[in-house]
Amino acid sequence: MEVTFKKALIHPITWISLGLITFQYWILFSPQQPHLERPVHLVAALFLTFLAVPLKPGRLPRFLRWGIDALCLGGTLLVGAYYWLSMTRLETRIESISDIYWFDIAVAWLLVVLLIEGVRRTVGNILVVVIVVFLLYGGFGYVLPGEFGFSGLPLADYSEILAMTTSGILGVTTATSVNFIFYFIVFGAVYSCVGGGQLFIDLAMRMVGKTCGGGAKVAIVGSSLMGTISGSAVANVTATGVFTIPLMRKTGMTGEKAAATEAIASTGGQLMPPIMGIAAFVMAELLVIPYSKIALAGIFPALAYYLALFVSADLGARKDGVGTLSDKDLEAVPPMLPRIHMLAPPLVLVLFLVLGYSAQIAVVYATISCFLVPYLRKETRFSLYELPQMIMDTGKQVAVIAVPIAAIGIVIAVAIQSNLALKFSSSLISASGSSYVVSLIFVILGCIVMGMGLPTVAAYIIGAILYVPALQKLGVGDLQAHFFVMYYCVLSMVTPPVSLASFAAAGVAKTDAMKTSIVSFWMCSAAFLIPFAFISDKALLFVGTFSEIAIAGAGLVVSTIFWAIAVNGYILRPLNIVERIVLLLSAGAAIVSPTGSMAWDIGMAVSVAYFIFHVATKKKTGTQYGVNHLQEKNGS
């Protein structure tokens, strides 16, 4: 919600956000000890959460709501004072040997309570339940019989691990928020405020608006570009769907299909380099590799994902005779040439990543360009009066992300101390009868179930703890295992029965949420096979020689396009059921099989041969069929 310049200028969120921004850029160029960087970041995020998301009017009277908010803010201030005064002691103490005082324990559990409440306000109750379950397991795991039993942690040791070391709340998740995520949030907020988001939509209109199925293609291109900035499926839907969904419906598409197209396109943004989603930054930290390698590895999976969707939009329009924009729709788009220079900031980001700069430095240069580039032309200049709103937006977005992923540090700490990951992976392999395929299916189901109620980054981190060790035991490489888990956590956004992106799109389109979710699932079914491709061939993640990578990448793209053709049931004429099954089986075999294997060769050969056969035996052109089909629907 936008506020006036004067209100934004005096709002505490603006000044706390400005303080956090100043601190973050200071430590980027003058790094400090972790017990300074991470507590300051976390405490500021908690302050912003309780200010930006106060308790809503409901059963509680106003004075009680205000009182609880005041207690949360006061508790946050107390935690901040503790870390400030104890900074040197916490940095120099020896874990499990140095003394632990009563106030250490009190502040540790105060911080836990504040984080749980912050999580409840920002992402809902499901993650709260997960955190509470792990907390109880850490203290009372001894009541569980058998393999999953755990002796439990004494209160003092538990408090030390959670809040006094860099193995718990101040561990890898908070470090990722401090070192990576924050700077990309700033870039996204600034670029959107100076007109970058609208530019992507207008650019998509100019690029593909006049083509067959242009309405859906605008959503696909616009949302994929926007996804490289936001990295959030639901945020993408709400930002771009309010424009693209009505646009698609104007072209004759059904509400469910329009909403599904937007949901799928927005979900793919979390897989789309160069920025991808927040989970990708966490992956880089967990694997201890440069983020640029994660972005590079994501190229072919994202390309196959979006090309399959793009082909579906084109063939669906040809088959049904709907989905193409009129000249009137395109006339409303402002000229691109006066604004083309506004594409510079994301290009600056990509350029510096390619040149080998760290992700943090690359995004800093990109953010600086956001302030300079608009002033190259009068038409794109922004007013300095917009800066307070820009700062507020940044602070709110940081809070919504930093607090939940810091809270997941609790899950990681308990899982490590209890050795839960190895116990779980052993049980999973045992339950699957040591079957490779069955184990993968169990992992997929686990990732999707978790992702149905959790933010993608939360689902991925928990999945990385529980499932990656199991995949590694099965002989899967580290990068492949992490990508496999992350991919299905992302796809949970469009997987029934609870698919948050589909539900958000259904809300915009005012369609049935479950019907929209089912349509989304069917339309992006190729995406559910893509992880099997890169888990069987690491060249798809840019690991291998140039020729291996090129052949594997081309094979994946082509086979997913054939799958999309079979799902739509149309190329130059409609496909009958036998043709669709043959193409689904051959394309599916090519997707999931190792490049160059017999199954891959047969799958590719049958798909290509069928395509040639189809073209040679076509009975009607796509245009003729589409027109006839539309006339039949209209009863004319």
Image (cartoon, rainbow, N blue to C red):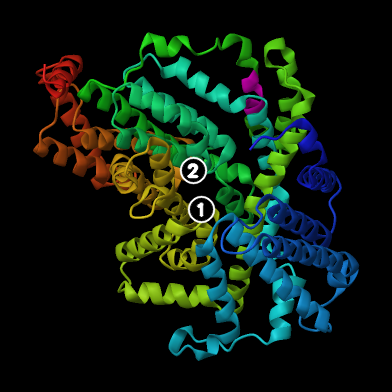
Q: Earlier in the sequence, mark 1 or mark 2?
A: 2
On screen, 590 above or below 83? above
Residue that label 1 marks: 456
Q: Secondary structure at mark 2?
A: helix
Residue 346 forms part of the magenta stretch: yes
Q: Secondary structure at mark 1?
A: helix
Residue that label 2 marks: 233
Query: Residue, x 47% and y 31% (percent of image)?
Result: 242
Q: Nearer the viewer, residue 210 or 353?
A: 210
Query: What span is colored magenta in the figure?
Result: 342-348
- Residue 41, horizontal then vertical, whole percent: 76, 55
Residue count near mark 1 (Cα–Cα under 10 Å), binned few <14, some 14–19, many ≥20: many
- Residue 133, horizontal then vertical, whole percent: 53, 75
Q: Are marks 1 and 2 in contact (CB under 8 Å)?
A: yes
Measure the alpha-carbon separation of dots 1 and 2.
Answer: 9 Å
**Is residue 32 something one can see in this rendering?**
yes
Quarter that holds the C terminus: top left
Residue 473 forms part of the magenta stretch: no
